[in-house]
Amino acid sequence: MTKLWGGRFAKKIDPKAESFSRSIQYDHKLAEFDILGSLCQIEIIKKANIITAKEYNLMKKGLNILLKDLENGKFDIDFNAEDIHSVVQDALLKKIGKTALKLHTARSRNDQVLFDTKMFSLKSLYDLVIEASYLIKSLKNTIQANKDLILPGFTHMQHAMPVSLENHFGAYQQMIKRDVNRFLDIAENIKITFGSGALAGTNLPASLYNIKGLPFDKDMQPSECSMDSVSDRDFVIEILSSLSICGMHLSRMSEDMILWVTQEFNFIKLDQSYCTGSSLMPQKKNPDMLELIRGYTGKLYGNLVSVLTMMKGLPLTYNRDMQHDKEPLFESIDIVKNSLKLMAGMISTLRFNKKSISKHLEDESLYATDIAHYLVTKGIAFKDTHDIVGELVKYSLDSGKKIVDMTDRELYGFNKHLNSKILKKLIDPVYSVSSKKSLKIGK
Ligand code: ARG
């Protein structure tokens, strides 16, 4: 394998140093973009008269063959190479001979790695948008399929008020929609820069920006400041933070469902294809996928903090520390892509245990606020209605008597506007949900 450097060295690199500094084990993922970047590079060097038309044609043909090989799984990666840039250069050398040595003219890996990583990031952000959209769709379909479903809503993990599934899953939809917007905003902010050289720009008379017709012209931006271009990793940090937020959302959804699937809640049935068993307890059907999604959040946050920390003390411009941006980036993208896929699958196969949910809805404390608001309509100050209903609930708990079973006389004792007929109307999940006027999803 030919190295991209070496002339000034009298000694070979120590094998331990060589393997320590290698990035090919992960940056091989950038192969496609590295070849595309080289296709741009030959346009520049042709225009700068560094290569002849014949050499240009030969290089273009060779690079296109490499792209095809990659597509067909025939592109060999030498995992003893230093990085993907060396592998592509070497592959071209093998395909077209010594003309390939002109490719790396007035270009630096510092610039190349940015081009590759930004292209990879753009593609990944659009993939994430697609996966997130599938999840939003599966939430929508599940709401549709369970149109009138009402469940207990919680605050502090205590029964609060009845809520529709539309409202509960609507909250997940909103979270994921914001994630999609974040991915798109970050993509919009990524400008593919090229031509910064190692740090100071290149001496070439041509640059990408006066060459028209390149495949990704519209994403290309002149490097406004070459020193910034080769040392900026903001976009990686932005992606990692948006993935952390999305992972946090998926973790919260998981946590809800982990609770809902317990015998104690028994609100839902997860499809068996997303559950695992126990090696010891034959009865178990565990929600491991949800737990793993929840658990991955730790890695997502760790990856964000690792790149933030790696960057914070770096002087301008490129420093090799920056190589450590890629593993966290690749890992976090994979985690969130896979989690979104699994979550969409679990949501669309989810079954609700309506009987068990209705049992929970029999808890009369869920309707306490509705009773208090009813009294407000009778001209009583909310603070007083709060006290009245608080006493009513306390009496019910102490006496073990359900509010709907209390006599008119007993109820009148709390307030003259309370009677059995009214309370039977108020202690009803459908009435409770439909009487809420504000901020109904989809209304
Ligand atoms: N593997 C390196 C990285 O990811 C590529 C750039 C190397 N540049 C250098 N000057 N050694 O950052």
Image (cartoon, grey):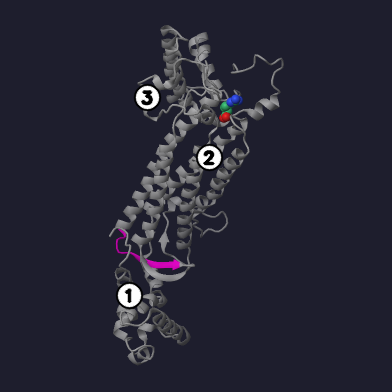
Q: Quadrant of residue 309?
A: top right
Q: Residue shown at 48%/86% (left/top)? A: 398
What span is colored magenta in the figure? Answer: 145-154
Give the residue type that dot 2 points to.
Glu
Q: Quadrant of residue 7?
A: top right
Instruction: Work out how far the residue at label 3 is from the one at label 2, CA to CA, in angstroms.
Output: 28 Å
Secondary structure of residue under mark 2: helix
Q: Is residue 26 above or below residue 96?
A: below
Can you give x and y, in whole percent of width and height, for residue 418 in the image? 33, 86
Can you give x and y, in whole percent of width and height, for residue 128 in the image? 42, 41
Secondary structure of residue under mark 3: loop
Q: Is residue 112 left or right of residue 174?
A: right
Give the residue type that dot 1 points to.
Asp
Lower sequence index among marks 3 and 1: 3
Q: Is residue 138 left or right of residue 248?
A: left
Mark 3 residue's CB less than 8 Å from ligand 1 = no
